[in-house]
Amino acid sequence: MNKKMYLLAQKIKQWGAKLGFQQIGITDTDLTEAENHLHQWLRQGFHGDMEYMARHGSKRSRPDELIAGTVRVISARMDFLPDINEDLFAVVDNPAQAFISRYALGRDYHKTVRKRLAALAKMIEHEIGDHGHRVFVDSAPVLEKPLAQKAGLGWIGKHSNLINQHAGSWFFLGEIYIDLPLPVDEPAQAHCGRCTSCIDICPTQAIVAPYVVDARRCISYLTIELQGAIPVEFRAMLGNRIYGCDDCMAICPWNRFASNTAESDFLPRHQLDRATLLELFTWDEEAFLSNTEGSAIRRIGHERWLRNIAVALGNGAAHEDVIEALQGRLYDSTTLVQEHIEWALRQLNG
C-alpha cells in the first residue's frame, strides 16, 4: 500500500469530521451490480416521469466516464434530523397539520453539503497540490447510495435508502470524484434480515419487492417529482403529506440509533414542522417564494404546492373554514390546482 495515500486517506477522514460530516468513506468505481439493478428498474418503468434517470447512458454507473480520470470516490454523510424524539406518526395522524419530509424543513442541503465538500477538496489540494476532482451533491448522474455502501457508510435497505448500523438513515450524502489511488474501505454489510416494516407501512405500497421501489406509487415522487395531476387512486393515501413522506424511515428499527443534527442549517424554518394545512394554503406566490428561499421545497413551485395542500385538505375534516379556503382559491387558480380543489371539495362533501 502506498504510505502517502494511506496517510492522506486518514487525514481526509479527520478533516471531514472537523467539517461536520459524521463519516467519510472511500471506494473504487466498480458499480457493475448497481448498474444491472438500475437497468432492470428502468426497463420496468419504475422511474415514472423522471426521465433524467435514463439519460447520460452509462455515465451514471461508471464514474470514470462522467469525469475522466476518476479512480476513487470519497463518500460523505451528514445527519439532518432536527429532533430524534419527535413522533412523526403523530404528525401524520393529525389531519389539520401539514407533514413535510424532515430533510426539507431547513436550508437546502445541496448548498450546505456542497460547501463542506468543496472545503474538504480544498484541504486535499492544499496537502498534495493540483489533482483531478469534482464535488457532487445530488447534482449529476451519480449513484450515490451504491457508492456509499461500497465506501462503508451503510447498506441499502429494503426501502432503497441507506442505513447505517450505528446511525440509522436520517442523513444526506455527497461525493468527491478524485483521480488519486487512495486506499478503499470495506463495503457495508446488509442487516435488514427478515424485517419488512418499511414495506408493510408504505401508504401506497410503493415498495413492490424488497429493495425495489416503484416511484410512480411513492408519495415523495407524487408530491415532488410529478409535474401534472396526482392520480386519483393515490390522493386519499397521501393523507396530510404535502412534501415527501418519511414513513419507511420513521418505522425502521435501526433509526433508534439516530442522532440529532448538529447543523443549524437543517433546523426547521418558518415553523414548518408544526404548520397547519390552512396556514400554508394561504401563501400566495410571493409568500411562497419568500418563505422557501434557500429551501429544497421551492423546486416544486407554488402551483404544485397548492395542488398538494388541496389534496391534503380534502383528506381532512369537513370544517367550514377548510371548505371556505378551498372555495376561495377555486376560481383564481390554475387548471391543475382547480382540479385538485374540486376533488377535495367532493371528498369533504361526501
Image (tube, helix red, strand yellow):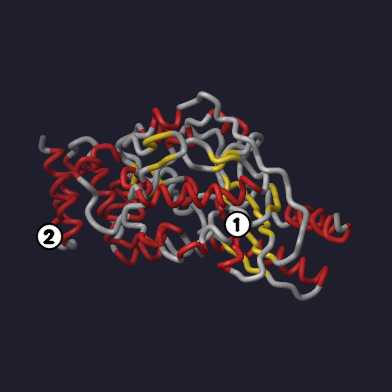
Q: Position of residue 57 (x, y in %)?
A: 46, 64
Residue 119 horizontal side relative to residue 237, left or right: right
Q: Mark 1: which secondary structure?
A: strand
For the N terminus, which image quadrant? bottom right
Residue 286 horizontal side relative to residue 145, left or right: left
Q: Residue at image x 42%, y 36%?
A: 247
Q: Residue at image x 56%, y 36%?
A: 84
Image quadrant of residue 19? Answer: bottom right
Q: Which residue is mark 1?
A: 174
User: Foreground residue, 151 or 85?
Assistant: 151
Q: Residue at image x 65%, y 53%?
A: 76
For the C terminus, which image quadrant? top left
Q: Which amino acid does the dot numbered 1 rest on?
A: Gly
Q: Which residue is mark 2?
A: 331
Q: Which mark is residue 344?
A: none
When the figure is inspected, residue 59 is found, relative to residue 280, above or below; the finding is: below
